[in-house]
Image: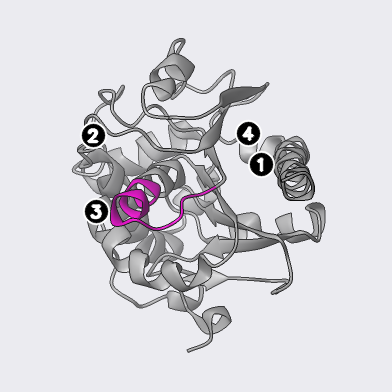
Amino acid sequence: MSAYKNPWFQVWSPSPSARLRLFCFPYAGGSASVFHEWPAALSRDIEVVALQYPGRGHRFGEPLISSCVSMVSALLPNIVPWLGKPYAFFGHSNGGLLSFELAQTLQRAGYPGPVHHFLSGKSPVHRPRRREALHPLPDDAFLGKVAEMGGTPREFIEDPELMRIFLPILRADFALSETYTYAWKNTRLRTDASVLYGLQDDAYAEGDLSAWSELIDGKLDSEAYDGDHFFIHSHRQDVMRFVNDTLQSRLANARGERRYA
């Protein structure tokens, strides 16, 4: 199967000649469509490859995966054929957890790692959760908590037919993060990374950047946005600009290193 026909990945603007691939991991309840506008906003040197998890988009009807380790295990053999050129990861919220776990798994297996890792709207994965687990709650209580977090319109949540389809996806995604246990003790991810966060996001706390530095063996920076957990939408242009500028800098440095080697 051609890599571009693999159901795990959505590529709106295929560019086999691009110098770098950016793999984008959606948040809980999200699909590859979260990143639909990104290819037009980023340099042609960057090929945007959005992850499409089972059970949504063109994969609707496939069994959902509610374990982070199981999701990474299923994804691993599918992503390896894409790693023949430099690549970066961008993961928001749940996507940050999945991308981090995948990067650690790739590193442990001896595959080349990402040249840059964008950890967006995600608290440090080795620290205790800051809120109660939501996925075991009854439907009404669960949806009420999800609505409080924002990102999902109230009218959407109150539509019985939509919820019949969407509720199992949401519950599986929340279970994926809420049952996760950090297992990479004494292992640091060998990559540069950026932590993106919203100043009004309850998932962010002072000290998160320092905590992430315990897991990253490379240059670590941060970028703050005047928004809540879903600043990835309210500040979409700013986020895409930051990602593009960061990756363009990496490409320019790589070009210079080859020139003067």
Q: CA distance from mark 2 to mark 4?
A: 23 Å
Please, what is the three-letter code of the amino acid marked with disc 1? Answer: His
The span picked out in magenta is 102-114
Please, what is the three-letter code of the amino acid marked with disc 2? Answer: Ala
The label on residue 133 is: 2
Q: Quadrant of residue 225?
A: top right
Q: State which tag comes first along the sequence, 3 or 4.
A: 3
Whole-percent x, y for residue 94 in the image: 41, 44
Please, what is the three-letter code of the amino acid marked with disc 3? Answer: Val
**Viewer-nearest residue: 93 or 105:** 105
| Contact (Cβ within 8 Å) of mark 1 with mark 3 | no
Please, what is the three-letter code of the amino acid marked with disc 4? Answer: Phe
Q: CA distance from mark 1 to mark 2?
A: 25 Å
Q: State which tag comes first along the sequence, 2 or 3.
A: 3
| Contact (Cβ within 8 Å) of mark 1 with mark 2 | no
The label on residue 231 is: 4
Q: CA distance from mark 3 to mark 4?
A: 27 Å
Q: Secondary structure at mark 4?
A: helix
Mark 3 vs mark 4: in front? 3
Q: Compared to 225, does 171 lie above or below?
A: below
Q: Determine which residue is flagged by label 1.
A: 233
Whole-percent x, y for residue 181 in the image: 20, 38
Mark 2 vs mark 3: in front? 3
Q: Compared to 87, does 245 lie above or below?
A: above
| Contact (Cβ within 8 Å) of mark 4 with mark 1 | yes
- Residue sitting at the far top: 206
Q: Residue at x 25, y 47 (%)?
A: 175
Q: Secondary structure at mark 3?
A: helix
Whole-percent x, y for residue 183 in the image: 20, 38
Q: Determine which residue is flagged by label 3.
A: 69
Q: Residue at x 77, y 44 (%)?
A: 260
